[in-house]
Image (cartoon, helix red, strand yellow):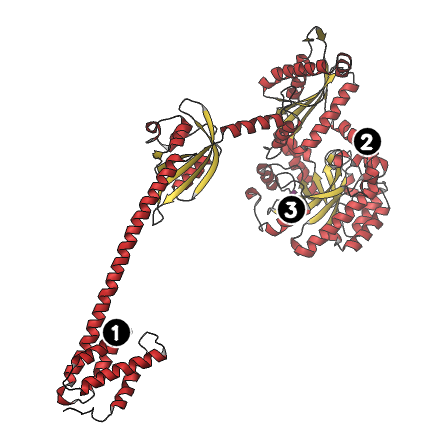
Amino acid sequence: MSGTTPVNGSAERFHEDWSRLLSADHGIAVHPGLLGRLVARTAALLHRAQLDEPFQPRLAAQAGAELVDAHFTDPVLLARAVELLQSQPIGDDRGPALTGAFAAGWANALRERTLSEQEAIRTAADAARKEAERALRASEARFRALFESAAIGIGIGDTDGNILAVNKALQELFGAAPADMVGRRVGDLVHPEDTPGVWEAYEELISGKREYFQFDKPYYRQDGEIIWTHLTVSLIRDDDGVPQYQVAMLEDVTDRYRLQERLRHQATHDPLTGLPNRAAFFERLEKLFENPEPGARFGLCYVDLDGFKVVNDSLGHDMGDQLLSAVAARLKAALTPLGHLVARLGGDEFVVLLENCRGEQEAVAAAKTVLKALAGPVLIGDHKLAVGASVGVLERRVSTTTPGAAVRAADLTLYRAKEAGRGRWTLFDPKENARAVSRYAVSVRMPAALDRGEFFIDYQPLYRLADGRMTAVEALVRWRHPQLGVLGPDEFVTTAEETGLIMPLGRWVLEQACGQAAEWIKQYGDAAPQLNVNLAVRQARSAALVTDLGRILDSTGLDPARLQLEITESTVVGPEDEALRTLHGLVDQGVSLAVDDFGTGWSNLAYLRDLPVSGLKIAGSFVGDLHDPAKDGATGWRIVSGLVSMAHTLGLNVTAEGVETRKDAERLREMGCDWAQGWHFGRPVRPAEIARRIVEEPKGRPVEER
């Protein structure tokens, strides 16, 4: 039936149906121009296959193949194309043959394409494998070359701590053969001077908790010599992240370490005598104050040679230097075996530091040892030189002073020994020391210190024992003296009172502290602590104090109920004392009063009845003496308990000062003491630290958990 066309449709209708079929979404994107040409070309091939004589099925097969070449490989497309072809009535029974040829052409083309892509993938994979093998061989060769020729020692071990391989540099570093190291345990290389934490870091590494660590670490060589290394250990994991190996790299830093040790020794030792110098002495002293045990004590013997200037001036500095060296040797030989540090501070001044001193007797014994060591003449060449010394002896609890204050006190005590006739030791006297420091400081600097901004205020927290909450802070004035360093109130307030300078200083303290307290209340509300400020005796007896305080409260905006003024027992000497009028005037303004250092000076306890006070503070010496082995602790606790009971009978709030241990705080709480302050609860700190405590302190934490 040549020349026939599909029933109910012309070639144009078939072309439209075919175009819609190929234009449908088949998961590929084809440019409209390319799609149009593909539709026209394949439709023409199918149309020719329907009409040409003789029948040529290859034309239909070619149409199917061209669709595959154009990436029309979706089986759904093939099914719909077959349906479309079967729906076209074709003469001479060509329809099934034409449809089959189209499907066969499409399938053969898809198979060829798939085989071609598989071959391309196989070829690429084979090339990639060969390249990877070549790269692996090259990488292994580079690693082996690096491992063997590296200038630093490299060792490889497993996570069980067995050494698997070492390079030549590591063998030379240890002076060992491979057999001496491979198979050994890493733990066999422990050295007594290992840096703290190195083995903890090692355990964390092999367990997978860290990836690497670095330390400076000593090792023993095969010949027993010590070498210092900079050690870096890294962890190697497998593809699943499981630790497999450890790689250690060791750089020999022995020369650098020894140089640093020499430089460190030179920096901390006196080049003339070989003794520790001033810097080393203060470093050692300051360590005592970092985290002292409760009740820890120390001693200082400040030594100055008698008549050294005469030797220096008459026989020359060279002879003087030889004398100093001989003196240093004697002091070191006599005191170092006792466990004491001997240092040269400069000139002909030496110092002996007694750590963990057992009391004044031990410090005095050290001073006597100094004098005995220097009692005999010193032979230098043809000269027989007589040398003596004066010694200032200080023995204190660590918690009662600071490093700078301790050295100043020992130095002043030394000069008291010299004034007393030389060739002797003199024991530290707190009252004499305070007077000496104060006289000097006030006479030279204090009149203008306020204007120069040399004073500042620290705040020591007071805690409520019932619930462990910070309830108040005590304002403590400090003087940043340009020559003497930071001075505490005990070192200048007494003389300030004697000279009248306490009045402007006291006003300044009230202004600054009240302003700070008001700021805390503004920021933290009820969580802000009460402010306690000490009043000097002369302040309390001044009628102007009431007016001054009123002005300060108005200017700062501080609620008077948030201010407590502390007075000493010596403020009021009798029921008719004019100070009582001032104290009542202060209380009338809304502030509260407390007696500070209670128990150290009262001659008539009945005065408590006349004072408008609401609290008292038990002197720190009562609590401190509880740990003095020379005193009866049980009796001391009974005294403290009696003071608490007496105060509560009078309706007074009780604060214990000088509390240094949790055990003391708990015992005070059990006997009903209300508040406490001391190093257990915190030392005097800057305002920012108080603010941090206000924000971070949990509510209601018991005392025993502090």
Q: Is residue 394 magenta?
A: no
Residue 636 versus residue 111 in the image, above or below: above
Q: Position of residue 139 (x, y in %)?
A: 35, 44
Q: Which residue is mark 1?
A: 68
**Earlier sequence position, callout 3 versus callout 2:** 2
Quick check: marks 3 and 2 in contact, CB under 8 Å? Answer: no
Mark 3: few/some/many CA within 10 Å (<14, 14-19, 20+): few
Residue 45 versus residue 142 in the image, above or below: below
Q: Which residue is mark 2?
A: 439
Q: Which residue is mark 3?
A: 689
Secondary structure of the residue carrying numbered label 1 = helix
Secondary structure of the residue carrying numbered label 2 = helix
Q: Position of residue 315 (x, y in %)?
A: 75, 12
- In the rendered image, the quadrant that contains the N terminus is bottom left
Res 638 quadrant in image? top right
Amino acid at dot 2? Arg
Q: Is residue 497 left or right of residue 697?
A: right
**Furthest residue in direction bottom, as rendered:** 8
Mark 1: few/some/many CA within 10 Å (<14, 14-19, 20+): many
Q: Position of residue 132 (x, y in %)?
A: 31, 50
- In the rendered image, the quadrant that contains the C terminus is top right
The part of the chain drawn in magenta is 673-685
**Earlier sequence position, callout 3 versus callout 1:** 1
Secondary structure of the residue carrying numbered label 3 = helix
Amino acid at dot 3? Glu
**Earlier sequence position, callout 1 versus callout 2:** 1
Foreground pick, 631 / 198: 198
- Identify the residue at horizontal 63%, vertical 47% (top origin): 470
Foreground pick, 168 / 249: 168
Residue 161 versus residue 266 in the image, above or below: below
Q: Is residue 681 magenta?
A: yes
